[in-house]
Image (tube, rainbow, N blue to C red):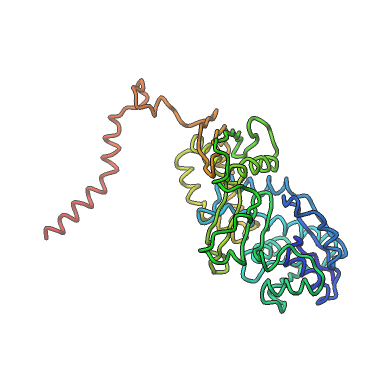
């Protein structure tokens, strides 16, 4: 039997390589997607081979991640429960997609992941497997093995000489990629407890950010940020640049209690400096370039789109259907946004577009040279008030009786 494992080198997947090899007497192929973890990838291949894998793939997927997954989500304005930038959610379908490709290449019988039976990631991985490779066997160790929690895993790791980046002193887990880093479990499970200051990796606290704001300009073409401060960049490099800028000014920290797909509430802490800037700036250029009714209709779809990403339905027809509508809306979302970054805040300092729908000659409170006849508003209001007057008269008649 040959199994391809989604491997990160963290606590769970480090244990899984050894456990799977022992339980199934199988050949284990480790696969790690490089989606922007940076220093977390150092020595990962050697560690995988040491803990049970016969081979380890480490594939650089950062540009694909930014171009085909993060940017479409930004164009859609996705924000789960009005707070979460979906950094973990959007990474899983890409990882699972490449995992399937490696399974085909290696002629593997099964794929495995390290997601727990309580979390969302198990759903995201397995829905992607179902959409792209329904014939492959899926192994989810957290739903099969004897371990009850991460303390058991730490003890197993010690007994088997497996080095893991978690200890009883810092029993929270983290997950990093180009869009964000997440922290959960352990000491963070109490939503009344403030996260420890030394936990954060991508950003300084707003209190320690510079005392002077930094101005940054973002250029958009068809809903995509293509340049930062006039310098043309690839999608991945845009995020790298904005992560540094945002992190320097304490942008993008989110601490929330979210509703997991499996039914429970969960506390998560996130750092999304670049994503927060992109999301905010994209909305600002849309205010100039999107038709009112298109914007309102698209906005009504954001909660549904965000749920689909959060739940793991990236490769589902309903997400693809919504994405097609999003792409139509973004054809003319082109222009430049100027922002001030200051102590955790994003402040608009200007916006312009060659296809702006904003017309100062119509909007002005001064004389508009006949661009707008204010008297026309009388009939407009009268017609819109007709049903309200009718209802009021009916209710008044009932009250008299």
Residue nearest the observer in this picture, 232 or 377: 232
One can see residue 168 in this view: yes
Residue 317 rendering spot, x and y as whole percentages: 61, 57
Determine the image quadrant of residue 176.
bottom right
On the image, the x and y values in percent for residue 372 come to 35, 27
Left or right of 221: which side holds 25? right
The single residue placed furthest to the right in the displayed view is 54
Judge from the rendering whether residue 136 lies leftward or rightward of residue 89; answer left or right: right
Q: Position of residue 24 (x, y in %)?
A: 82, 76
Q: Residue visible at 68% across and 46% down?
A: 66
Which image quadrant: the N terminus? bottom right
Q: Is residue 144 left or right of residue 339?
A: right
Farthest residue toward the top?
Answer: 369
In the displayed structure, 178 sits above or below 225; it is below
Relative to 144, is 168 above or below? above
User: Which quadrant of the figure has residue 182?
Assistant: bottom right
Which one is in front, 231 or 195?
Answer: 195
In this view of the protein, which residue sits in the foreground, 50 or 298?
Answer: 50
Instruction: Reply above or below: 61 against 26.
Output: above
Numbered marks: total = 0
* Residue 157 point in image, percent of width and height: 77, 71
Please state, as top left, top right, bottom left or bottom right, where the C terminus lies in the image.
bottom left
Q: Quadrant of residue 229?
A: top right
User: As rendered, which of 189 and 241 lies closer to the eye?
Assistant: 189
Q: Is residue 305 visible?
A: no
Query: Residue at the location (59% across, 43% down)?
Result: 327
């Amino acid at each position: 039997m040959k199994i391809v494992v989604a491997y990160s080198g963290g606590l769970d997947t480090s244990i899984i390589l050894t456990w799977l090899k022992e339980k199934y007497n199988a050949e284990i192929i480790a696969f790690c997607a490089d989606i922007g973890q940076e220093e977390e990838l150092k020595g990962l291949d050697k560690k995988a081979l040491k803990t049970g894998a016969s081979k380890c793939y480490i594939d650089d997927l950062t540009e694909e991640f930014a171009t085909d997954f993060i940017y479409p989500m930004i164009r859609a304005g996705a924000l789960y429960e009005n707070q979460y930038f979906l950094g973990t959610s959007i990474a899983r379908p890409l990882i699972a997609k490449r995992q399937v490709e490696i399974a085909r290449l290696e002629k593997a019988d099964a794929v495995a992941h390290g997601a727990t039976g309580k979390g969302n990631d198990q759903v995201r991985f397995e829905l992607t497997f179902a959409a792209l490779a329904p014939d492959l066997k899926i192994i989810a160790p957290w739903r099969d093995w004897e371990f009850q929690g991460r303390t058991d895993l730490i003890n197993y790791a010690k007994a088997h000489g497996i080095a893991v980046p978690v200890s009883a002193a810092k029993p929270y887990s983290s997950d990093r990629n180009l869009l964000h880093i997440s922290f959960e479990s352990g000491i963070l499970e109490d939503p009344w407890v403030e996260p420890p200051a030394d936990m954060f990796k991508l950003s300084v606290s707003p209190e320690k950010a510079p005392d002077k704001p930094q101005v940054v300009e973002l250029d958009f073409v068809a809903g995509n940020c293509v340049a930062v401060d006039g310098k043309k960049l690839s999608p991945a490099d845009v995020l790298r640049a904005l992560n540094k800028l945002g992190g320097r000014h304490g942008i993008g920290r989110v601490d929330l209690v979210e509703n997991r797909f499996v039914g429970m509430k969960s506390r998560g802490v996130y750092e999304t400096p670049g994503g927060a800037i992109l999301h905010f700036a994209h909305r600002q250029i849309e205010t100039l370039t999107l038709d009112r009714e298109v914007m309102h209709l698209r906005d009504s779809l954001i909660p549904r789109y965000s749920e689909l990403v959060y739940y793991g339905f990236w490769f589902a027809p309903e997400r693809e259907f919504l994405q097609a509508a999003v792409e139509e809306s973004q054809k003319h979302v082109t222009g430049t946004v100027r922002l001030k970054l200051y102590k955790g805040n994003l402040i608009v300092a200007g916006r312009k577009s060659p296809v702006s729908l904003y017309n100062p000659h119509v909007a002005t409170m001064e004389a508009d040279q006949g661009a707008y006849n204010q008297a026309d508003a009388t009939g407009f209001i009268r017609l819109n008030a007709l049903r309200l007057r009718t209802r009021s008269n009916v209710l008044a008649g009932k009250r008299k009786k």
